[in-house]
């Protein structure tokens, strides 16, 4: 059965969907969807093709949007996505993840909600909400956001989340209890002697390597890290990168040693591609060595950035890799990041890119 | 607020297009029983489930960038909506 690839693009002004066949040479663009709401993250369900978008509108608050017909029609719900009366209300939904029929949603201010009915109703993951460190969580530049939700396809009890700027937290019991998982990651913005706290790191993006192992990668505000024990400990793998700063990370669909990054020039230097020359950096040995790949990317005066959720790989072989930029361009590689093609331009500022490979 | 049968002269409520676009079939103008702003929004939610979440946050309050005017005065959730009131629900200047 031939397959098709959908790129699910969240933007400041709605969802866009790019679609191609397995060759990934030509793409058709559809959108904007979701009434042009700011949508931070969009994912698709491989089982049934349903698409979920997490967003928030300045007028109307947070919502999870859903389409079951490829984007033609959408519904929205925030039923149950609320904190108790008197607490700071939820501003927006920031992240969404699917596994074993459960739909998790991360929000700002940081919290996690879960739906067991396909996104109609949500319930809080109270264990994270009640975590004793929560009163001390500090917001990052984009707010106190829960932006990464990492689920284990083989074990629904295992959940990792990343919060800016509270760090990584892990639950091994389906969300009932949580523990920080930040050992070895720096917080350069804290005073000397306090730069390796139990929590409070500014993690930018957390991804899991494929397979049954415990390997995780994180792009942090302060460095690039790998964990081989489910986040119990982290080692720096930033040596060889042009910068310790960046937002997104994209794992390979099959190779746990491979990872793709888009480093930026620095937290206080503009946060764009170093020297205005966008480059995707790739490792095939777990971060021991890095190679920059820029063929097909603009190599002069290109001062765009790529946000934390705006880079992804697909599940085809060779794997496709994609990123969306702040200038509204989407770039695609059909050869595991070696060469790149711009497949869309002039979209609103792009927040997220995910892939959905389904039967054509 | 208790409304007697004799007082059932509906308020005329105007809804913003950015809101009705989210609820297929919702009209821009709707007649609703008088009472309070909160009761009015509950009535909207009973007709178009989920509309309260779009208009109110959990504090609970009308969302910061949504304005409710009752007979020309900006109104909070506990404000009275008298019979035959003119009610406007408006989206505030916001966004970029």
Image (cartoon, helix red, strand yellow):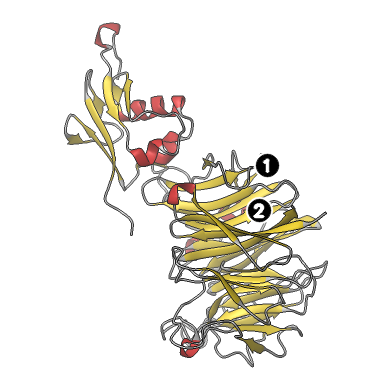
A194 sits left or right of A360 in the view: left
The numbered mark, 2 or 1, whose residue comes first in the sequence reads: 2
Is A232 rendered above or below residue B67?
A: below
Q: Which residue is mark 2?
A: A44
Q: Which image quadrant: the N terminus of chain A? A: bottom right
Identity of the residue furthest to the top in this view = B6
Picture quadrant of residue A169 = bottom right
A6 sits left or right of A13 in the view: right
Is A244 rendered above or below residue A1?
A: below
Percent across and percent down for residue A155 are 80, 57
Secondary structure beneath dot 2 equals: strand
Q: Nearer the viewer, mark 2 or mark 1?
A: 2
For mark 2, name the chain.
Answer: A
The residue that appears at 32% across and 18% down in the rendered structure is B33
Secondary structure beneath dot 1 equals: loop
Q: Which residue is mark 1?
A: A116
Percent across and percent down for residue A68 are 64, 42
Percent across and percent down for residue A245 are 53, 83
The residue that appears at 41% across and 86% down in the rendered structure is A269
Residue B55 seen from this side: no
A224 or B58: nearer the viewer? A224
A237 sits left or right of A41 in the view: right
For mark 1, name the chain.
Answer: A
A206 sits left or right of B13 in the view: right
Residue A57 seen from this side: yes
């Amino acid at each position: 059965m031939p397959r098709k690839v959908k790129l699910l693009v969240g933007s400041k002004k709605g969802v866009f969907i790019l679609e191609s066949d397995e060759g990934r040479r030509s793409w058709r663009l559809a959108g904007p969807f979701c009434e042009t709401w700011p949508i931070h993250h969009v994912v698709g369900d491989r089982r049934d093709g349903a698409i979920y978008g997490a967003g928030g509108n300045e007028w109307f608050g947070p919502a999870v949007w859903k389409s079951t017909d490829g984007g033609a029609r959408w519904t929205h719900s925030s039923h149950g996505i609320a904190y108790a009366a008197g607490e700071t209300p939820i501003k927006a939904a920031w992240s969404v993840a699917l596994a074993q029929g459960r739909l998790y949603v991360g929000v700002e201010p940081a919290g996690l909600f879960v739906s067991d009915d396909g996104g109609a109703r949500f319930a809080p993951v109270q264990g994270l909400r009640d975590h004793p460190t929560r009163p001390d969580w500090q917001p990052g530049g984009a707010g106190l956001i829960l932006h990464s939700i990492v689920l284990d396809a083989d074990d629904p009890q295992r959940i990792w989340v990343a919060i800016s700027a509270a760090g990584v937290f892990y639950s091994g019991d389906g969300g009932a209890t949580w523990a920080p998982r930040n050992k070895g990651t720096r917080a350069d913005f804290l005073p000397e002697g306090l730069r390796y706290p139990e929590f409070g790191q500014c993690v930018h993006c957390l991804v899991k390597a494929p397979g049954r192992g415990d390997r995780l990668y994180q792009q942090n505000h302060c460095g690039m890290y790998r964990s081989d024990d489910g986040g119990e400990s982290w080692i720096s793998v930033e040596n060889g990168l042009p910068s310790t700063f960046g937002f997104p990370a994209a794992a390979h669909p099959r190779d746990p040693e491979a990872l793709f990054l888009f480093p930026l020039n620095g937290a206080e230097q503009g946060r764009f591609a170093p020297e205005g020359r966008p480059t995707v950096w790739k490792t095939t040995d777990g971060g021991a060595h890095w190679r920059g790949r820029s063929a097909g990317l603009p190599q002069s005066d290109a001062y765009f950035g790529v946000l934390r959720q705006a880079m992804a790989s697909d599940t085809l072989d060779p794997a496709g890799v994609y990123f969306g930029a702040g200038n509204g361009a989407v770039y695609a590689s059909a050869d595991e990041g070696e060469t790149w093609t711009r497949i869309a331009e002039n979209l609103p500022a792009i927040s997220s890119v995910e892939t959905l490979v389904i039967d054509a | 607020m208790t409304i007697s049968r004799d007082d059932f002269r509906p308020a005329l409520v105007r809804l913003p297009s950015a809101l009705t676009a989210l609820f297929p079939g919702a009209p821009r103008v709707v007649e609703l029983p008088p009472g309070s702003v909160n009761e009015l929004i509950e009535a909207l939610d009973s007709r178009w489930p989920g509309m309260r979440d779009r208009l109110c946050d959990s504090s609970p309050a009308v969302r910061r960038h949504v304005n409710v005017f009752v007979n020309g005065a900006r109104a909070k959730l506990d404000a009275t909506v008298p019979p035959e009131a003119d009610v406007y629900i408006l989206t505030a200047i916001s966004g970029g």
